Image (cartoon, coloured by chain):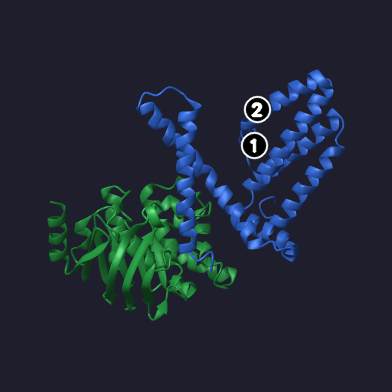
């Protein structure tokens, strides 16, 4: 059912949930929203462990935000803020895990159509989104190659020695990607 | 076969102090089905093939594909001339295999069903059908290059230009790509350092120091190239 739901509906629901999240003020409401999203994963047939793994990269962010709120506004507010962030990220993951990229892109392109009045090209917004999604594993791969090269040369972990080649290689890849897009008729 | 006319083409990168001539006074007419392009790194061969679908516009001279000028009819030229690069990662633009193959068709005014059908047929033909919904970045190097080829071939170009498509592949995958190229009915223009791939080609162009220095049958062309490097 979650997989079959139209992408525009899922995107609209995500947007509404994001805006509506400001109305969540206590732990019980946040708990209910969290449970609802987890229910979405169950309904979609995605194991809960997979769902929770999706928020692992957020750990440091929520730990920092949580600690800040415990000190500044108290533990209850901290739980609400951390809970809202985690729930929204889980919801976003539920949408991306159950929707084909093409459908997501088409939904965004459709939503951007009214912006043509202001000179926005919806197809370009869609392409940008698709390229963004595609670029994540590419940049991760480049980062691994740079790190391997550093290790092979016996260099210690240096942010500069890591960042400079990564940026240079990423820019080169962008250049090549631009050429490939032209070759595939994107500008035509 | 399509007629490719390169007329008195010179191409220059940069200006004044940084000016570098990468192709000088090249004129050639190509009508054969299998054309190889060889030369040392920096000899001008990659610039030459980039001229053929308008990726590079000549500083001087003209390039025409079936009488369509790359300078004025770029869109039509690119529809006829498909281009495949050496690094497949640089030309796969969509996250999944089927989506990437469909990418080039979405601007052709085809229905969704027609696009799906052509994508499925192409993936099956080249043995990638079981990977249709897989993320492209999880494919092996050889599969990625096959995907890049599929993404070009699905748009049904009449000319296929390949710039060192097997350079980053191991022997097995290079042979697989070479087999795919052998079976094509298209006019194929192949830049390569793997000289044995050109054995049964109709014609081979040799570039050196920005000039076309030899144009002939594979055996003589390869011999000429070897003499240049010794």
Residue A15 seen in the figure: yes
Residue B27 position by quadrant = bottom left
**SS at circle 2:** helix
**Drawn side of residue B118 relative to residue B65, left or right:** right
Residue A182 appears at what percent x and percent y? 49, 62
**Residue marked by disc 1:** A51
**Residue sitting farthest toward the bottom:** B67
Q: Residue at x 48, y 54 (%)?
A: A177
Q: Give whichever of A114, B20 is nearer the camera.
A: B20
**Residue marked by disc 2:** A59
In this picture, is B167 found above or below A40? below
Q: The residue marked by circle 2 belongs to what chain?
A: A
**Drawn side of residue B105 relative to residue A107, left or right:** left
Residue B127 seen in the figure: no
Q: Give whichever of B8, B174 is nearer the camera.
A: B8
Q: Give whichever of B62, A134 is nearer the camera.
A: B62
Check whether the beta carbons of the residues at disc 1 and disc 2 lie within 8 A of each other. Answer: no
Sequence-earlier tag: 1 or 2: 1
Real-space CA distance between mark 1 and mark 2, rounded to the nearest whole angstrom: 14 Å
Q: Residue at x 64, y 49 (%)?
A: A98
Q: Quadrant of the N terminus of chain B?
A: bottom left
**Drawn side of residue B11 relative to residue A88, left or right:** left
Q: The residue marked by circle 1 belongs to what chain?
A: A
Which of the two marks, 1 or 2, is nearer to us in this view? 2
Q: Residue at x 31, y 49 (%)?
A: B169
Q: Which chain is green?
A: B
Residue A36 appears at what percent x and percent y? 77, 39
Q: How many marks?
A: 2
Q: Residue at x 38, y 80 (%)?
A: B66
Rendered shade, chain A = blue
């Amino acid at each position: 059912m979650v997989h079959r739901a139209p992408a525009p509906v899922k995107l609209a629901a995500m947007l509404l949930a994001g805006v509506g999240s400001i109305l969540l003020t206590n732990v019980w409401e946040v708990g209910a929203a969290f449970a609802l999203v987890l229910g979405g994963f169950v309904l979609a047939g995605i194991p809960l462990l997979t769902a929770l793994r999706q928020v692992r990269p957020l750990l440091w962010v929520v730990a920092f935000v949580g600690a800040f709120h415990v000190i500044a506004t108290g533990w209850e507010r901290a739980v609400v803020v951390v809970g809202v962030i985690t729930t929204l990220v889980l919801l976003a993951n539920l949408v991306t895990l159950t929707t084909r990229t093409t459908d997501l892109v088409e939904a965004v392109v459709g939503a951007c159509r009214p912006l043509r009045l202001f000179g926005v090209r919806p197809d370009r917004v869609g392409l940008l989104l698709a390229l963004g999604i595609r670029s994540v594993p590419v940049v991760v791969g480049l980062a691994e190659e740079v790190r391997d090269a550093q290790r092979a040369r016996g260099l210690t972990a240096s942010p500069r020695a890591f960042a400079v080649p990564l940026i240079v290689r990423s820019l080169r890849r962008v250049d090549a990607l631009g050429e490939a897009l032209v070759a595939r008729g994107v500008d035509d | 076969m399509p007629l490719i006319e390169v007329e008195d083409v010179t191409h220059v990168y940069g200006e004044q102090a940084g000016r570098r001539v990468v192709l000088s006074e090249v004129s050639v007419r190509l009508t054969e089905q299998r054309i190889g392009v060889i030369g040392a790194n920096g000899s001008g061969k990659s610039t030459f093939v980039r001229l053929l679908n308008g990726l590079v516009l000549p500083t001087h001279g003209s390039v025409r594909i079936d009488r369509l000028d790359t300078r004025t009819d770029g869109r039509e030229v690119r529809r006829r001339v498909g281009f495949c690069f050496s690094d497949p990662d640089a030309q796969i633009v969509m996250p999944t295999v089927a989506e990437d193959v469909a990418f080039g068709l979405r601007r052709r005014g085809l229905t969704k069903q027609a696009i799906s059908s052509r994508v499925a047929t192409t993936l099956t033909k080249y043995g990638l059908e079981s990977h249709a919904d897989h993320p492209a970045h999880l494919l092996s190097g050889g599969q990625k290059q096959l995907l890049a080829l599929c993404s070009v071939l699905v748009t049904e170009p009449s000319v296929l230009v390949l710039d060192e498509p097997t350079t980053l592949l191991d022997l097995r995958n290079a042979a697989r790509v070479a087999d795919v190229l052998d079976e094509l009915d298209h006019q194929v223009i192949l830049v390569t350092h793997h000289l044995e791939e050109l054995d049964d080609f109709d014609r081979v162009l040799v570039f050196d120091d920005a000039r076309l220095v030899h144009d002939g049958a594979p055996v003589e062309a390869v011999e000429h190239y070897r003499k240049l490097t010794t």
